[in-house]
Image: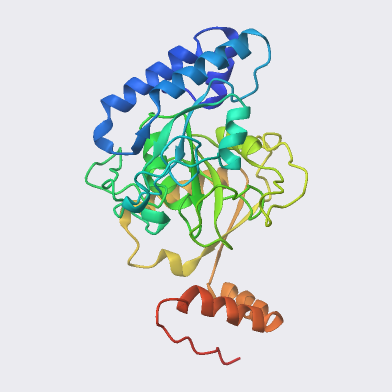
Amino acid sequence: MHNQTIAELAKGLQAGEFSSQELTTAHLARIKQHSGLNCFITVTEVEALAQAKIADQLISDGKAGPLTGIPLAHKDIFCTQGIKTSCGSKMLDNFQAPYNATVIERFNQAGAVTLGKLNMDEFAMGSSNETSFFGPVKNPWDHSAVPGGSSGGSACAVAARLAVGATGTDTGGSIRQPAAFCGITGLKPTYGRVSRYGMIAFASSLDQGGPMTRTVEDAALMLQTMAGFDSRDSTSVDKPVPDYSTGLNDSLAGLKIGLPKEFFGDNLNTQMAQVVEEAIAEYTRLGARLLRCPCLILIYLFRLIILSHRQSVLLTYRVLTGFGTGIVVKPLKI
């Protein structure tokens, strides 16, 4: 069962091929078996089995949704009522949140099962998952390598089939980079689409929660539950949530994908270059147009943005690069 996707498991649960309790028990056993990966900070076995029992009843009563009975795990940055929320830090080692983050609340309402809380770089400040108070997380494909970060525990758990899907957070790449390192799907939604209420902040103007799964279809299913307006988050966007699954099989014919030439220099790792070229070939086969362009185009576009919003951009640049670091940032001459 652990090799099936969320979409496949949902069909199996609905068809009565197995129960959520059986599915949850199987994943809890895998978590124990692969504890050396160190991707979990807290395993909530008792709570998970209780949720699975409720999910089985919902399925039996015909009240199940796409995520009912699906075992997920959450980055330990989301507050979970009565369960430790450490943010990977000794400072919060004994902290139990008195409430659930909106993201957790929505998954609970959807009938999903929480297997536990996942390891991460301390306070999400890192990109290798080596800064956690609870020790580094290993890449499940190569234990001598890092899984990326700060959502390294989430990426590792999904890649190792310890959880069918996981939540992560992304400020400057903390979902996308570990997803790439571990060979899974990771999505940073548009800012404001997913509520930040109950999500411990790193950089509030950039932080965003998102799904980490094995497939794009599964990411769409998770985001469908995560997304939506929340009055408790002042930056939440009050717009209808579209059906993210509808366009999954749309044709790529005519889609233009830019490839900055400078990213393909002599210093590019040979293995990485091969993987990227294979992806380029696949996109081409599917009808997309690949355009190799110089970074100068990107620089030109960025200068246009600066010229149009120079005061805002300079202020943002100062905050992002110099705030709290002792670095003096000089204004750009344009």
Q: Is residue 38 above or below residue 204?
A: above
Q: Is 19 positioned to the left or the right of 334 in the image? A: left
Q: Look at 59% across and 82% down and name the residue there.
A: 314
Q: Position of residue 37 (x, y in %)?
A: 27, 37
Please say whether residue 121 is visible from this viewpoint: no
Q: Is residue 85 above or below residue 69?
A: below
Q: Position of residue 26 (x, y in %)?
A: 38, 17
Q: Look at 62% across and 34% down and name the residue there.
A: 106
Please say whether residue 97 is visible from this viewpoint: yes
Q: Position of residue 224 (x, y in %)?
A: 65, 36
Q: Look at 37% across and 42% down and name the residue there.
A: 153
Q: Nearer the viewer, residue 246 or 46?
A: 46
Q: Nearer the viewer, residue 110 or 280?
A: 110
Using the rendered view, name the quadrant where residue 139 is placed. Answer: top left
Using the rendered view, name the quadrant where residue 317 is placed. Answer: bottom right
Q: Is residue 205 above or below residue 76?
A: below
Residue ranking furthest to the left:
144
Q: Look at 59% across and 10% down and name the residue there.
A: 57
Q: How is the image coloured?
A: rainbow
Q: Nearer the viewer, residue 37 or 179?
A: 37
Q: Is residue 312 above or below residue 48?
A: below
* Rendered-image quadrant of the N terminus: top left
* Rendered-image quadrant of the C terminus: bottom right
